[in-house]
Amino acid sequence: MSQSMFRALIPPADPQGNIKSAKRTACRASGLLPSRAIRPPSFTFKSFAPSPASTSYAKCGSYQYDLESGKYPLTWPSLDHMKVWLRKEEDAQGVSFLLKEAEPNGGKGVHQWTTKHIYVCSRVGTGGKSKYVPNHPEREREIGNKRMDCSCGVVGKSYPGGATILGKYDNSHSHPIGAENLIYTRIPPEVRYKIEQDLRDGIRPDIVLARARGNVHTEQNLPHLASHAPRPEEFIKAKGVPRIQKKIEAGTIHLDAQDGRSTLQWVEHLEAIRALMYFKSSSDPPPPDSEMLLFTFIVRDRYGRGMPIAWLISSNGKGDTIDYFLKNLRARNPDILPSKLMSDNDSAQLGKYRFRYPESLLLLCWWHVLHAWQKHFVITHFAELWDKLKGWIRITDPDKFWTCWEEIKALAPDSVIEYLEEYYMGETTLKMWSAMYRKDRTIFELCDTNMLVEAWHHILKTHNMEGKRNRRVNQLIHTLINVALLNYIANHRAQQFRIPWPRSRASEAKSN
């Protein structure tokens, strides 16, 4: 497009301010008008058009200027096309590019271009000089230092009024490229995204790793590997997948770096979905020897397994804490009344159970009862007594029960007899542990120990938490709500339609 430039000769104003006189004087002086003749003023114009092939008159930094000057020889239809080109170049050269800066135009020519997208070789990095000082610089590393000076870089420039990108590329590296440089490259973005999706879908990390590598490391694929250049994703290390998984957990489980603040955010989330019965915090610091405790209410299903119905996560297991839990549990579920409650012989817990659920029959766990009995004598010295006690607790016939009691008194030391008579032979306590009072039960009441709770905790640790040690409340809440609870909902759904639900490997190992 041609353009014209004009210049006008304008007469100066008269010092006295007489404009007409000044114009007339100028015209006479130029010879355009005769003396004393009155004519309108005249102007002289000069015009010219630059050559279309010249950039002399295109504004510096504009699309036309950069295109014609040759400073930006590469062209892409859009920024996405530029990124695709970068990925292909990474695969071809065995390098990685990092976005160092997306520099907006804040200078004088603000209307000529909008943004410069500056990519550098990953060996340079996008930050400043590292402050890391190795403790043993004399030791040889398996992989040398990645950071070094490299002049390679790509600049893409965008302009107003269109998506076209002009770019320039300096492909001079100061280090080896290709297969020798793959150990310094990063996981490609599309592969990382695929790993994240697979992990979110619950696929096992080992399968995720094989899929990320393209499933190329097979015996049948050896001829292909021998004839093709290596790709960065082929050498993703096994620890790369857990790192990505931790980042996912940081956004979905560990909502804050501090466990306390993260727990408060979980409380808000549970309240929003009406899954929280109550939350109580204390400003006092926990005792130095306290640990995170998990109390679980479990009911027996028709397949002989325990199904948790309520959880308490607390830093202590004192009676007041149990009472607060039971009070809120009954207030939240006023229409649900358990016929029987089973626990170990903890006087503090039993007292709170009687207070909050006076209508329920309290039972003692047989395992805890026998464990308490065997503490008062040496089993190896009184083997016959120990066999009698193990059978005595299971006798349902009253006559046989009291006959066995006389036999036990004949075998046991006086201290053991006094202990049993004081703590276990009272009318109230006897009903809590003797099998004489555990007859004519339904399938949901056929439980004599707390092993369902123990089995549940075993499943939680080995199956739901995959055997990983945990000391964070937010991790435990996530596992209970988003992992364990989903499995039990599916289990309950199957039982509604009389469909046997398979046991997990963890529960099978526990039952065997």
Image (tube, helix red, strand yellow):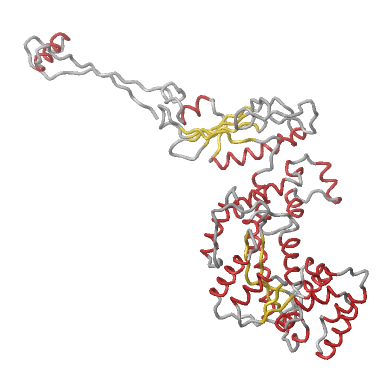
Q: Quadrant of the N terminus?
A: top left
Q: Quadrant of residue 315?
A: bottom right
Using residue 116 as the reference point, say whether residue 320 is left or right of it.
right
Residue depicted at 74% across the width and 41% down the height: 231
Residue depicted at 86% across the width and 84% down the height: 406
Give the image location of residue 19, x and y in percent: 11, 17
Q: Quadrant of the C terminus?
A: bottom right
**Seen from this angle, which residue lies furthest left?**
36
> 350 or 250, which lies in front?
350
> 280 or 466, which lies in front?
280
Q: Quadrant of residue 441?
A: bottom right
Q: Taking 73 as reference, is 397 above or below it?
A: below
> 250 or 239, which lies in front?
250
Give the image location of residue 239, x and y in percent: 74, 46
Give the image location of residue 57, x and y in percent: 41, 23
Give the image location of residue 211, x and y in percent: 74, 52
Q: Taking 35 as reference, is 258 above or below it?
A: below
Residue depicted at 64% across the width and 81% down the height: 360
Q: Quadrant of residue 389?
A: bottom right
Using residue 473 as the reference point, say whether residue 47 is left or right of it.
left
What number of labels is visible?
0
Using residue 62 as the reference point, say whether residue 339 is left or right of it.
right
**Seen from this angle, which residue lies furthest bottom?**
399
